[in-house]
């Protein structure tokens, strides 16, 4: 079976490390709200479009801005780590694991879509923006959890049969 769209298995461990560290730091940043305050990790950065939030000035295209990039690094770490975890080959990759992977991805899409509708209907105000940021990760996290749970469950059932 060809799996051209999957990363080699050796990337999975690096993905777990990147994903785990980024998630833990992201949770700590959200809870404490000052893990890395606005004065740390400030670098000049190219903004394709810079619109001052709640500002009266209009936005500008292709502008160099000085900004704290810790949250952007966490978002990148969670997404890249999650993609490596979810889409790296297993040691034994066959049609069954491919089926589990695709079913888990579809399931994660459905759950995320339902969650998006519920959030849009029942959550308002500033917390809604927080959920929109978390929404960047929902589908990937649900996919990883579901795929590894179903894989664990199927491996457990196979060991009982032997």
Image: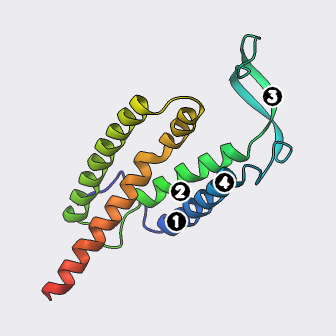
Reply above or below: 135 against 152.
Answer: above
- Compare residues 141 and 87 and report the one nearer the observer: 141
Q: Nearer the viewer, mark 4 or mark 2?
A: 4
* 48 on left or right of 43: left
Residue at x-position 53% and y-position 33%: 128
Quadrant in the picture for residue 61:
top right
Furthest-left residue in view?
161
**At which x and y percent is residue 62?**
72, 20
Mark 3 or mark 2, which is nearer the start of the sequence?
3
Are circles 2 and 1 on residues that touch, CB within 8 Å?
yes
Q: Earlier in the sequence, mark 3 or mark 1?
A: 1
User: How much space separates mark 4 and mark 2, taking CA atoms?
Assistant: 22 Å
**Is disc 2 placed on a helix, strand or loop?**
helix
Residue to which mark 1 is pinned: 16
Query: At numbered mark 4, what does the secondary structure look like: helix, strand or loop?
Result: helix
Q: CA distance from mark 2 to mark 1?
A: 6 Å
Q: Residue at x 43, y 67 (%)?
A: 9
* Quarter that holds the N terminus: bottom left
Which label is found at residue 65?
Answer: 3
In the picture provided, is 101 more to the left or to the right than 115?
left
């Amino acid at each position: 079976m060809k799996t051209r769209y999957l990363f080699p298995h050796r990337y999975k461990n690096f993905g777990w490390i990147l994903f785990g560290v980024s998630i833990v730091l992201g949770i700590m940043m959200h809870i404490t709200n000052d893990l890395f305050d606005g004065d740390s990790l400030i670098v000049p950065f190219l903004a394709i479009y810079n619109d001052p939030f709640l500002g009266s000035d209009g936005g500008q295209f292709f502008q160099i801005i000085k900004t704290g990039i810790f949250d952007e690094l966490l978002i990148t770490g969670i997404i890249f780590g999650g993609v490596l975890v979810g889409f790296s080959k297993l040691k034994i990759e066959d049609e069954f694991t491919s089926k589990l992977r695709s079913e888990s991805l579809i399931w994660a899409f459905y759950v995320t879509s339902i969650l998006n509708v519920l959030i849009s209907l029942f959550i308002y105000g500033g917390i809604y923006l927080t959920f929109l940021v978390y929404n960047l990760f929902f589908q990937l996290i649900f996919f990883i959890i579901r795929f590894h749970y179903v894989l664990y469950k199927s491996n457990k059932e196979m060991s009982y049969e032997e």
